[in-house]
Amino acid sequence: MIVDDEIPAVRELKFLLSKYPEIEVVGEAYDGEDALELARKLKPEIIFLDIHMANRDGIETARELIKQKPAPFIVFATGYDQYAVQAFELNAVNYLLKPFQEERIASTIARIMKWAEKKETMEKVFVENEIEKMLQQTVNLKLTDKLAVWDTEKIKIIDYDEILYISVDGRQCTVHTVHGNYIAYMNLKDLEAKLPTDRFFRTHRAYIVNLSNIDEIKIWFNNTFIIQMKNCKDQIPVSRTYMKMFRNTIGL
């Protein structure tokens, strides 16, 4: 079963798993509550589980799922690496970072099949050296100074330097770059937490700007600012909420 509130991520993972004849995707859920209900009905042997979801996050959902008898194998599939320790505390089979890498999925399936054949419980399988090894693999996969975004049906990796600004539209964000605009299926708060604070600044409830790509700053009404970005005609507002912090950041 696949659990993720990002439909493109569900489609991508389902496609990658379709290459394995021993794997059958029996169901899809888009939040933690639906996942628990569906898992009780379908009793899947493996659950690929996102962490950041509405209603109930993946960590909390996993804590409930492993209480089931028999407990399913849990594979966390997420865009965030800071939850690795919690994942392994819950005896997760693996921790896959988005964008997914085929070799990591292959190793995950191989590990599951091996354990299933031996009929070992997850509690017996997980020992400290295994946890340490997989945690190291996770750290090595971390993207440095790069952001994974969607370009139609493809995942594109862009450098932070390419980003001009980010705007929010509903439950997704648009990443505006020097080469075009891309979709990030994350909310602005999560993106803000992911990006380095010395390079990116939240100017408004709907905008984050790359400080190094600001061309000029104009005085706007009510003593606020409008930011003109380099290489584009777009102007980004600085709301009164963020004015004092913005002034301090740029040294005004």
Image (cartoon, rainbow, N blue to C red):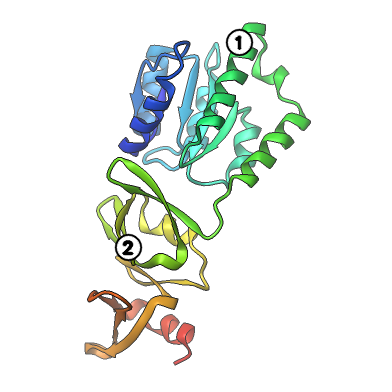
Residue lying at 37% horizontally and 32% vertically, measured from the top left: 12
Depicted 108 relative to depicted 205: above or below:
above
**Numbered disc in front, either 1 or 2:** 2
Task: Tell me which residue sits at (59%, 45%) in the image.
Answer: 141
Q: Look at 52% across and 66% down and name the residue there.
A: 196
Cα–Cα gap, marks 1 and 2: 47 Å
* N-terminal label among 1 and 2: 1
- What amino acid is at disc 2? His
- Badges 1 and 2: C-beta atoms under 8 Å apart? no
| Quarter in which the N terminus is drawn | top left
* 177 versus 68 height, above or below: below
The x, y position of residue 108, in whole percent, is 57, 25
Please determine whether, in this image, residue 181 is positioned above or below residue 211.
Answer: above
Secondary structure category for the residue under label 2: loop
- Helix, strand or loop at disc 1? helix
Q: Position of residue 135 (x, y in %)?
A: 67, 39
Q: Residues within 10 Å of mark 1 (few under 14, many from 20)?
A: some
